[in-house]
Image: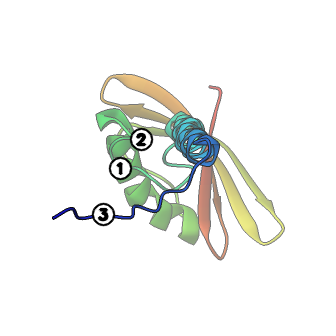
Amino acid sequence: MKRWVLVLTERGSDREGKRRRIAALFVVLGGLIGSFGVGSVLASDPIGYGVPVWPFADTVDRAENALLSQVVPAVRSGAALDHAGVEVLRRTQAYGSAFWTLKLEVDGETRCREVAVGLTVSSRRVDC
């Protein structure tokens, strides 16, 4: 007794599958390149961008962030700053905000940062 099995297959090339794999590869590569670009920007000034955490910030960046958090109340109140390791280079009042340029001694490194205190606190790294 013979049994016949009918098999239905779709004939043609596998171009559509290849296109999907290539498109997926480009999406993955684009994601990797994009995340590398964003990560390198965030690592350039992690405190200024608000991400003083690993993998963007090293130990000196985290120490600088801790020092700035101690300095901000004095900048808000406009009081004299008598914190060890912090020197005020310049003070400016404009647009309802206080702009202070600070020279910080953090873990043996000298860093300068301009701090703007208004409704929010922001800062950016500047040259000494």
For residue 14, side relative to residue 73 (left or right): right
- Image marks 1 and 2: residues in contact by CB distance under 8 Å: yes
Closer to viewer: mark 1 or mark 3: 3
Q: Residue furthest right?
A: 95
Q: Residue furthest bottom?
A: 119
Label 3 sits on what residue type?
Answer: Trp
- Residue 119 x %, y %: 65, 76
On the image, numbered disc 1 is attached to which residue?
A: 53
Q: Which image quadrant for residue 78?
A: bottom right
Q: Residue furthest front?
A: 1
Mark 1 residue crowding within 10 angstroms, few (<14) / some (14–19) / many (20+): some
> Which mark identifies residue 4?
3
Pick the front one: 101 or 62: 62
Decide which of tag 3 and tag 2 comes sooner along the chain. 3
- Image marks 3 and 2: residues in contact by CB distance under 8 Å: no
Q: Would residue 63 be seen by someone viewing this image from the given angle?
A: yes
Image point (53%, 63%), residue name: 79
Q: CA distance from mark 1 to mark 3?
A: 67 Å
- Residue 9 x %, y %: 48, 57
Closer to viewer: mark 3 or mark 2: 3
Image point (49%, 45%), residue name: 46
For residue 84, side relative to residue 125 (left or right): left
On the image, numbered disc 2 is attached to which residue?
A: 56
Is 118 rendered above or below residue 30?
below
Label 1 sits on a secondary structure element that is loop
Q: How is the image coloured?
A: rainbow
- Residue 120 x %, y %: 61, 71
